[in-house]
Amino acid sequence: MNIVIDGRMLFWTGVGRYTRALLHELEAIDQENDYKVLVRKKDWDLWEPSAPNFQKIECDINPYTLAEQWELYVQLRALKPDLVHFTAPNAPVLYSGRRVTTVHDLTLLDYDTSRGTGMQRWLRGLKRRPFRMVLAASLRRSTALFTPTEYVRHQIIERFGIDERRVHATLLAANPISAKPEPIERFGDLGRYLFYVGNMYPYKNVGSTIRAMALLPAEYDHLDLVIAGKRDEFSAALERQAEELGVGDRVKFLGYVSDGELVSLYREAEAYINPSLSEGFGLQGLEAMLQDVPVLSAQATCLPEVYGEAAEYFDPHDPADQMEAIRRVLDDDTDVDERLRKAGHERVKQFSWRRMAHQTLDVYRSGR
């Protein structure tokens, strides 16, 4: 087969990591099919095929734009593929060739991530309507759909009435970060801390963890919450919240960190915390387990499916319950943290990028 893979988001955070891992594994296991990978000009020099049956094709069309609805459609028709794998559901509605699509989550249907205020926010929110239409078309027209968890698979089947035989849960995995640990002194004395890395959209629910910090008794005044991720209006709102709750000096926003600094931040943390209300997989928790860090997690969406017995769970809508979970993990009189570390070592072994790629290739070949 002549297979096209949409790699226009090759270096985005979530979709990009999935796409790079899929390509890496397919190059290792499939020497029969020919692959053309669509790559934007800005990413052109950042990825090179390592197998002779893989070729990159320039496709300088930004994702989630009107241009991809026509220009990408025209380019795909010219390439005449036997199969297109859209690694996210933002695909040209008009394209009628055989396609498979990866749906990472349905968060954008349930939570507003629009920036700004007033009319600006309202106008940006309007963009969600075309996305819903494109998503619905992608679900209908794809011969097969991939999801990162059974949770998202069941969401698609139940909410859109999709035949369950067309929807395949191909679980993701976490590889150890390849970068060597780097010093983190530039962030000052972090002391003992809980760690979170990621964006700070409201559905990520980081504000609940700040409220939980404010509820901790005085004996935990030495404990900080360290947050790594893009500084934006959402992080600014969280900073204001921390100040209002009287824990501004104990909630530290680091902004962007390098991969080497990220390794060190994981390793030095007392625990990793994921309070999110909606996830498709929750990769950072597995990354923390790989770094021997106990994980605290919201009892929400796919997270119990992914973390299993290797996390201490809390109600994400109840900061007091989250506070108690933090105390259980950090209490020196219990062995909860050690139990979670051991469980984490075993949990990460259950996930494999190679298995994910084999499952994906099986679907390519089966025609369903």
Image: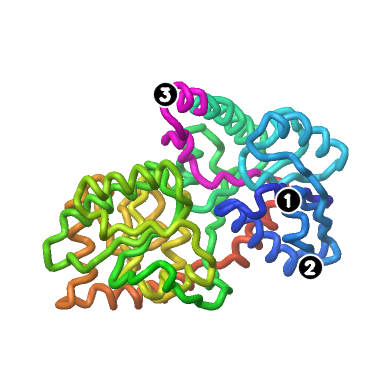
Question: How far is disc 3 from disc 2 in space, using C-alphas?
Answer: 49 Å
Above or below — where is 308 with respect to 44? below
The residue most toward the left is: 218
Question: How far is disc 2 from disc 1 in space, using C-alphas?
Answer: 20 Å
Above or below — where is 180 with respect to 324? below
| Frontmost residue, 38 versus 221 | 221
Read off the residue under disc 2: 50
Q: What's the mark number on residue 118?
A: 3
**Residue at image x 26%, y 58%?**
249
Report the side of 232 relative to 97 (left or right): left
Answer with mark 3 or mark 1, whichever residue precedes in sequence. Answer: 1
**Residue at image x 58%, y 33%?**
135
Q: Give the number of the mark in front: 2 or 1.
A: 1
Image location (x, y in percent) of residue 357? 65, 61
User: Callout 1, which amino acid?
Assistant: Lys
Element at label 1: helix
Read off the residue under disc 1: 42
Magenta segment boundaries in residue numbering = 101-124
Q: Are marks 2 and 1 in contact (CB under 8 Å)?
A: no
